[in-house]
Image: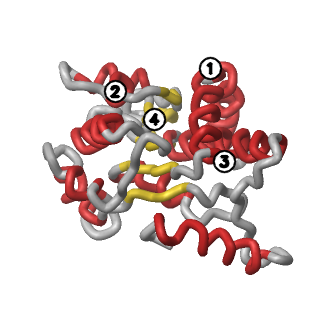
Amino acid sequence: MSKTPTAAAYLTELAARMGRLIEENSDSIAAAADAVERTAKADGLVYIFGTGHSHNMAEEAHYRAGGLALTVPILSTPLMVHEGAVASTAFERMPGVIVPVFEHYPMGPNDVLIIVSNSGVNTATVEGAQLGKARGATVIAITSVEYSKQAARGRTRLAEVADIVLDNGAPPGDAIMNVPGSELRVGPISTSIGAALMNAVFAEVAVRLQSSGTDAPIYLSANMPGAKEVNDALIARYRPRNRHL
């Protein structure tokens, strides 16, 4: 018997949900890979945006060993949690707050915008998707369809705006483990599954590019042989268009 039964149950359930992702999102993963591949071949960029904890997805892809160098994180301190978590919750609900943020990121028709929001209803993420579409970018949402339907209460949902929806399958509230003797739940899954979905798409694209004779722009871990030369070349290529390099 496990010494940590709740931890074991959480990891087992998380692994099971991970294993169902390709079946439950097969068409959406293929569509997302098609969009990112087109962007890569057009020398476009993949912008990634989220508020609160969802902003971690933007940083997950940024300058990532084994990741695509064409990714650009959209980062705005007031919408993140590290300098004011309570304030960020208020800011992400404010109409218009995203407009000056997106002015720093000149996305266009050759680009992809990935927006991550588990609840899928906060104003900044929905307006961000609308701005991306207005600029001609292909908008991919990573969200919980079930949670967003429950949370919407008449509001526009990210899943309704996006061109492609990757459903993380998280339940309302995100957490999957009951806490005995209470109504509480623990063990969120949206970050783990969101990162898996995003990296699955990027892995598919990287192999497609190499197979078609196009060099995939992949960062190497700094401790791998030849990493400096490879990464320096990618930085020189993308730094003029990625303000975070």
- Residue at x-position 34% and y-position 27%: 161
Element marked by disc 2: helix
Horizontally, is 47 left or right of 6 in the view?
left
**Residue 73 versus residue 241: which sits nearer the camera?**
241
Q: Is residue 184 visible?
A: no
- Residue on which disc 1 sits: 27
- Residue annotated with mark 3: 4
Camera-near label (4 vs 2) is 4
Q: Which residue is mark 2?
A: 161
* Along the line of sight, the residue nearer the viewer: 48 or 180: 48
Q: Is residue 174 above or below residue 241?
A: above
Q: Earlier in the sequence, mark 3 or mark 4?
A: 3
**Image point 38% across, 49% down: which residue?**
50
* Viewer-nearest of discs 3 and 4: 4
Whole-percent x, y for residue 170 in the image: 48, 30
**Which residue is under mark 4?**
138
Say which amino acid is labelled 2.
Val
Q: Position of residue 237 (x, y in %)?
A: 60, 68
Helix, strand or loop for disc 1: helix
Which one is earlier in the sequence, the residue at label 1 or at label 2? Answer: 1
Distance from disc 3 to disc 2, alpha carbons, whole Å, reads 42 Å
Q: Earlier in the sequence, mark 4 or mark 1?
A: 1
Gap in angstroms between the C-alphas marked 3 and 4: 44 Å
In this rendering, the label closer to the viewer, 3 or 1: 1
- Circle 4: residue type: Thr
